[in-house]
Image (spheres, helix red, strand yellow):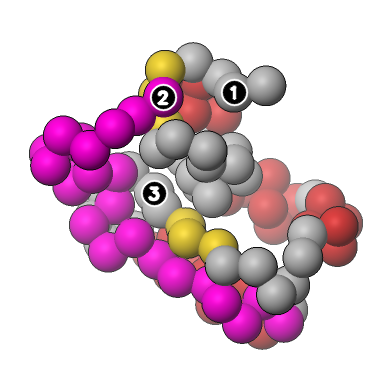
Amino acid sequence: MDIRPASDFAVDHIPDALSVPFFTFFHNRSLFQKLNKDSVYLLYDLERNSKNVRLMARRLVKDGFKQTFVLRGGYVEWLDKTYPVELGETP
């Protein structure tokens, strides 16, 4: 889950990521009732030490999403390591 603003996600993101902007998550919680709580979720924000990504991960775990993880270095580190990215929005 890419928690950056949708406009940032539209530029580029980790392949197969789901755009879930931080404020959308907390303002429209009903969207998450459709997600499988047994799936693995990896959350990331732009920065390495994002407070928002940690808050969102804690909320998901509290809501029963037990396999929730945070990409420690954030998207910045992903880019620094030249890992693959997708450009533009995915369908």
| Helix, strand or loop at mark 2 | strand
The 10 Å Cα crowd at callout 2, few under 14, some 14 to 19, many 20 or more, is some
- Is residue 75 toward the left or the right of residue 37 in the image? left
Figure quadrant of the C terminus: top right
- Residue 77 counted in the magenta span: yes
Q: Residue at x 86, y 57 (%)?
A: 34
Question: CB of mark 1 within 8 Å of CB of mark 2?
Answer: yes
Res 86 quadrant in image: top left
- Is residue 54 toward the left or the right of residue 76 in the image? right
Question: CB of mark 3 within 8 Å of CB of mark 2?
Answer: no
Decide which of tag 1 and tag 3 comes sooner along the chain.
Answer: 3
- Picture coordinates of residue 53 (x, y %)? 45, 61
Residue pointed to by mark 2? 86
Q: Magenta residues, as a range? A: 64-86
Label 3, label 2: how far apart the Cα atoms are: 16 Å
Label 1, label 2: how far apart the Cα atoms are: 8 Å
Three-letter amino acid code of the residue under disc 2: Glu
- Is residue 11 toward the left or the right of residue 65 in the image? left
